[in-house]
Image: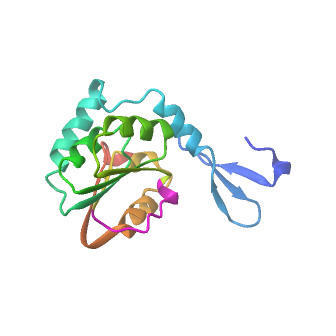
């Protein structure tokens, strides 16, 4: 909790990341999100266990829906899906907000010249580039405002591009 004399108040359910609002201005600021996802990155793997099987199946299935020569992967985690994408696309830009996840993915795909990694929160993403496909796999259930993240994905689509969003449980969005 943030002291009230600081001019900040904290709101939001404890199960989601907390938002802070500057009193009297309505200014929204990400609060603790980088720290939260960096903590998750210490134990998460998209290669191990039941979750790993789901992610790997998803990668093999969804790649058939993607099109074009370039793809923006929003939420690359440790690079499981990125690995599949690197074999299908001429250009892959993989984004994750956790430094450790980007590091693991970069190590996994160090030999791939067609993959670029970006460490950024989705809400802050401004690449100045358009893609044939934008994929958002297993991310919307983890963000404060899924509609905003979908819109950011749409902003990165080229003419005739396709955005593919997948969540493991639609009720979680």
Q: Residue furthest bottom?
A: 159
Q: How many marks?
A: 0
| Quadrant housing residue 44 | top left
**Would residue 137 be found to the left or right of residue 9 on screen?**
left
Q: Is residue 108 visible?
A: yes
Q: Is residue 70 above or below residue 81?
A: below
Image coordinates of residue 7 in percent, x first then y, are: 81, 55
- Residue 142 in the magenta stretch? The answer is no
**Would residue 55 be found to the left or right of residue 75 on screen?**
left
Q: Coloured how?
A: rainbow
Residue at 32% x, 68% y is: 157
Q: Is residue 53 above or below residue 158?
A: above
Image coordinates of residue 155 in percent, x first then y, are: 39, 69
- Return the residue nearer the eye: 47 or 167: 47
**Would residue 78 be found to the left or right of residue 111 on screen?**
right
Q: Is residue 14 visible?
A: no
Residue at 50% x, 58% y is: 123
| Quadrant housing residue 54 | top left
Image coordinates of residue 56 in percent, x first then y, are: 22, 36
Residue at 82% x, 50% y is: 6
Q: Residue furthest top?
A: 49
Q: Which quadrant, please, contains the N terminus?
A: top right
**Would residue 163 be found to the left or right of residue 118 on screen?**
left
Residue at 42% x, 61% y is: 147
Q: Residue furthest left?
A: 64
Image coordinates of residue 126 in percent, x first then y, are: 47, 64
- What range is drawn magenta here? 122-132
- Return the residue nearer the eye: 160 or 12: 160
């Amino acid at each position: 909790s943030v002291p009230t004399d600081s001019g900040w108040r904290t709101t939001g359910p404890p199960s989601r990341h907390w938002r802070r609002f500057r009193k009297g201005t309505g200014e929204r600021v990400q609060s603790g999100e980088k720290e939260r996802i960096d903590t998750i990155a210490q134990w998460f793997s998209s290669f191990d266990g039941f979750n790993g099987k789901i992610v790997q199946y998803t990668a093999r299935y969804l790649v058939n829906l993607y099109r074009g020569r370039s793809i923006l992967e929003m939420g690359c985690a440790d690079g499981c899906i990125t690995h599949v994408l690197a074999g299908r696309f001429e250009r892959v830009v993989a984004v994750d907000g956790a430094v450790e996840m980007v590091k693991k993915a970069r190590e996994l795909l160090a030999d791939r010249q067609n993959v670029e990694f970006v460490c950024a929160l989705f809400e802050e993403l401004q690449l100045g580039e358009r893609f044939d496909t934008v994929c958002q796999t297993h991310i919307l259930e983890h963000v404060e405002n899924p509609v905003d993240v979908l819109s950011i994905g749409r902003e990165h689509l080229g003419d005739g591009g396709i955005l593919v969003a997948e969540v493991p449980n639609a009720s979680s969005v």
